[in-house]
Image (cartoon, rainbow, N blue to C red):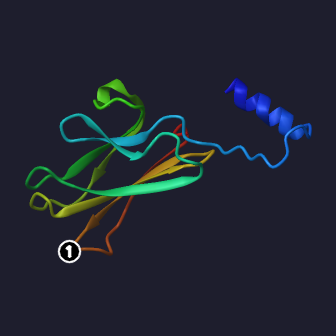
Amino acid sequence: MALGAAIQAEILSGGFKNVLLLDVTPLSLGLETFGGLMNVIIPRNSTIPVKAGELFTTAVDHQRAMLIHVLQGERERAADNWSLGQFALEFESAPRGVPRVACNLKSTPMASCTCWPRHAHRPGKNRGNEIRGGCG
């Protein structure tokens, strides 16, 4: 970080010409998945701003809720990464694999995570939750 600040100071003083510094995510952002693993959605060193997402489904028949746990870090096990926040997302009971939950992570100076249920058989009934801040 000190090196980036020194380069930025030199650019501002006019010492460096035609140099552009880009902000990047220092660590990967992802979600905890079944089995306690971290599923990386935005890999580290992605240029900010960046937005990425994935579609998840249930692992158990008639599951009525899903715990969304947002993580930052590089470890495979979710417990070994930093927790940025979590919430339970409730939806209608359905057979395993039918409910779809879209989770989007957005890394900006004011990062956020937005997740909402998307049922294949009820596409108009979307109600989501959001975690803001601390993701970048």
Image quarter of the C terminus: top right
Image quarter of the N terminus: top right
Left or right, 48 with reference to 92: right
Is residue 102 or residue 66 the one in the foreground? 102
Taking the spot 13% from the left edge, 50% from the top edge, the residue there is: 59
Q: Position of residue 99 (x, y in %)?
A: 20, 62
Classed neighbour count for the residue bearing mark 1: other residues with Cα under 10 Å, few (<14), some (14–19), many (≥20): few
Is residue 79 or residue 132 the one in the foreground? 79
Taking the spot 25% from the left edge, 48% from the top edge, the residue there is: 66
Q: Position of residue 26 (x, y in %)?
A: 54, 35
Taking the spot 12% from the left edge, 62% from the top edge, the residue there is: 94
In the depicted structure, whether residue 125 falls above or below residue 116 = below
Q: Position of residue 30 (x, y in %)?
A: 38, 42
Disc 1 is placed on an element classified as: loop
In the depicted structure, whether residue 2 falls above or below residue 92 = above
The three-letter code of the residue at mark 1 reads: His
Left or right, 61 with reference to 118: left
Left or right, 19 with reference to 85: right
Q: Which residue is mark 1?
A: 121
